[in-house]
């Protein structure tokens, strides 16, 4: 059975779907300590900006005032601004006692559910056309948020309005979130979809097979430059050349006014292990080095629109 | 130990590297009959257009006048035009005796070696700079040819001239020729290299980490539009934006004057199997559909230069 929520607070613990086990199994993890949660964040059992915001806030509840644990949690994934934001927002009311911290964390959860619904509607309103073929990368669905997701939230709204022809989901090397998670979500939604190797994205646009590209965001700089899953920038280049709208869908909290431009966004390199193996099978010679930037930065001039829960920004 | 040649004639037999065993083991097959060679071709122990041309010609030597064996060899891989070409060229002199057939076959081998060496030198001359970081896709090395290869031939010449800082090899989904074959060749060449997910190519260029992109070609249209391994077009877009040269390296025979532009090149879709599985591991839910174009077309305006064994073309 598909849980209604990817992440939630249940009987004194954080419960979340272990995304590393999908699509083979849907396993709910029950995390009782901040360090258990940090481990789950580091190995990407929970991922996606909104889900990480909720995880950060609920992690502060688990920390029960342990400042060192809170600091470790806040630094568990440096690129994920929402994680730090969720931690900070819950920690800000720590002096009002544990009940206040829990209320703050649950408010973040509820705000995410409402924000995703708003983004879905605003994004669907923005796009023109009735039989849309949407390309997307990584997983931006309920698995990345609490319920509906960001870019996938727009896809879901389009589908509910009968305006979705097909989703072209990029497999999203190295961890294959598109192949493993997005296809699984789309199948459960009943949305027609095809899986595509990442490198084919720009070419399929050039061939006329895509009406819009919808992506999420990990961090949006003040000038609109957007850090997102590696491969997003290549899609933006392909979209520009093909004249296809490239739309970022992310909650307002993803915008970081303290970061003036993409040049100031630190990009995490996740090491060779994910690249030299594919689905557990070693694919490159022993000892092969790799570059493995987890994210890239799409310059604002390649972004048609940024859809948030509050507004549409045209960088 | 790296064999000098991927395929050769040694003491009355065809010797070739079994590419299905790479990168785990380097096994030289010694094939004494045409049917042994046909078996090796069918299971892709030998692949790559130039290597198949040589294999076809040497197979005619093994056939020793057996016309039925020659016909079976010629049809071993119906789409491989170079195989039939090599068979025909050797068989054309069969009436002059076995020595003439062997001479014709060795001439094809030697012509490939000379062409790759010429491309390597011309390409290395073309590029400026002393500590070059080269990005490449798929396998264009000796494993596809006899000794040095096309784009990889240029890399080898740069390395021999002490001008190569590093190769950034794209893994090349779905069949991972970059991860499996190119890294293995580069390791044996002693060339510093990193493996990179295909989707990271354009971003690494934007970050200033690449001095030139070198790719091979499957077919070049009369106007310079170039069909090559899927992902080449995305690299060309990234190179243009970053101001990095995008250079195609291919023998003159790859240019097809009968094809006016890329729009006339038919792109093979190799089906969902390669996308939803790897090495027996399923990576997408059962029943997931996929688009799997094996090649893409890079428009000529994105190509800085085409280097052949005869000249440099600037489309």
Image: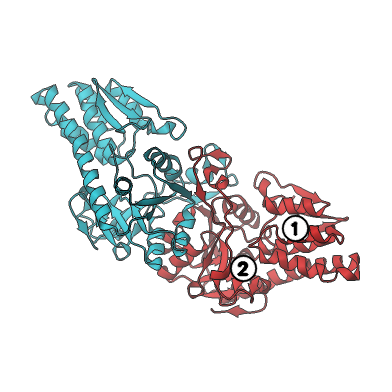
Chain colours: A red, B cyan
- Identify the secondary structure beneath mark 2: strand
Which percent across, then down, holds residue A75?
Answer: 70, 60
Residue highlighted by disc 1: A72
Which percent across, then down, holds residue B281?
Answer: 56, 39
- Identify the secondary structure beneath mark 1: helix
Q: Earlier in the sequence, mark 1 or mark 2?
A: 1
Chain letter belonging to callout 2: A
Kindly identify the residue that appears in the image at 39 percent across and 41 percent down. Answer: B190
**Residue in the foreground of this view, choosing between B103 and B299:** B103
Chain letter belonging to callout 1: A
A14 shown above or below B44: below
Residue A80 lies in quadrant: bottom right
**Residue in the foreground of this view, choosing between B130 and B54:** B130
The disc placed on residue A219 is: 2
Can residue A2 be seen in this snapshot? no
B212 shown above or below B183: below
Mark 1 or 2: in front is 1
A15 shown above or below B87: below
Kindly identify the residue that appears in the image at 85 percent across and 67 percent down. Answer: A101
The disc placed on residue B222 is: none
Is B182 on the left or on the right of A180, as rendered?
Answer: left
User: Quick one: label 1, few (<14), some, or many (20+) residues within 10 Å?
Assistant: few
Residue B6 lies in quadrant: top left
Can residue B145 be seen in this snapshot? yes
User: Quick one: label 2, few (<14), some, or many (20+) residues within 10 Å?
Assistant: many
**Residue in the foreground of this view, choosing between A13 and A244:** A13
Q: CA distance from mark 1 to mark 2?
A: 20 Å
Is B143 on the left or on the right of A83, as rendered?
Answer: left
Which percent across, then down, holds residue B282?
Answer: 57, 41
Which percent across, then down, holds residue A13?
Answer: 84, 54
**Residue in the foreground of this view, choosing between A161 and B313:** B313
Do the residues at pointers 1 and 2 share their chain? yes
């Amino acid at each position: 059975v598909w849980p209604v929520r990817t992440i939630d607070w249940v009987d004194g613990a954080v419960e979340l779907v272990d995304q590393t086990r999908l699509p083979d199994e849907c396993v709910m993890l029950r995390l009782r300590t901040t360090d258990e949660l940090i481990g789950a964040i580091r190995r990407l059992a929970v991922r996606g900006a909104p889900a990480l915001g909720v995880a950060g806030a609920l992690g502060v509840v688990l920390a029960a005032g342990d400042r060192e644990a809170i600091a470790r949690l806040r630094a568990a994934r440096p690129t994920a601004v929402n994680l730090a934001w969720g931690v900070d927002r819950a920690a800000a009311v720590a002096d009002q006692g544990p009940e206040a911290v829990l209320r703050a964390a649950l408010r973040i959860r509820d705000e995410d559910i409402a924000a995703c619904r708003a983004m879905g509607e605003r994004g669907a309103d923005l796009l023109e056309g009735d039989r849309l073929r949407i390309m997307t990368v990584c997983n931006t669905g309920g698995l990345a948020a609490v319920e509906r997701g960001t870019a996938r939230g727009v896809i879901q709204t389009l589908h509910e309005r009968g305006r979705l022809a097909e989703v072209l989901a990029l497999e999203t090397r190295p961890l294959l979130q598109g192949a493993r998670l997005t296809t699984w979500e789309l199948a459960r939604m009943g949305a027609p979809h095809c899986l595509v190797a990442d490198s084919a994205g720009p070419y399929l646009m050039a061939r006329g097979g895509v009406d819009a590209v919808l992506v999420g965001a990990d961090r949006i700089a003040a000038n609109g430059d957007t850090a997102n899953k590696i491969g997003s920038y290549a899609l933006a280049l392909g979209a520009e050349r093909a004249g296809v709208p490239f739309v970022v869908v992310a909650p307002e909290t993803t915008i970081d006014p303290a970061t003036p431009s993409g040049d100031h966004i630190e990009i995490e390199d996740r090491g060779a292990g994910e690249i030299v193996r594919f689905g557990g099978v070693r694919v490159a010679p022993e000892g092969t080095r790799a570059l493995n930037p987890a994210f890239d930065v799409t310059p604002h001039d390649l972004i048609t629109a940024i859809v948030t829960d509050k507004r549409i920004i045209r960088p």
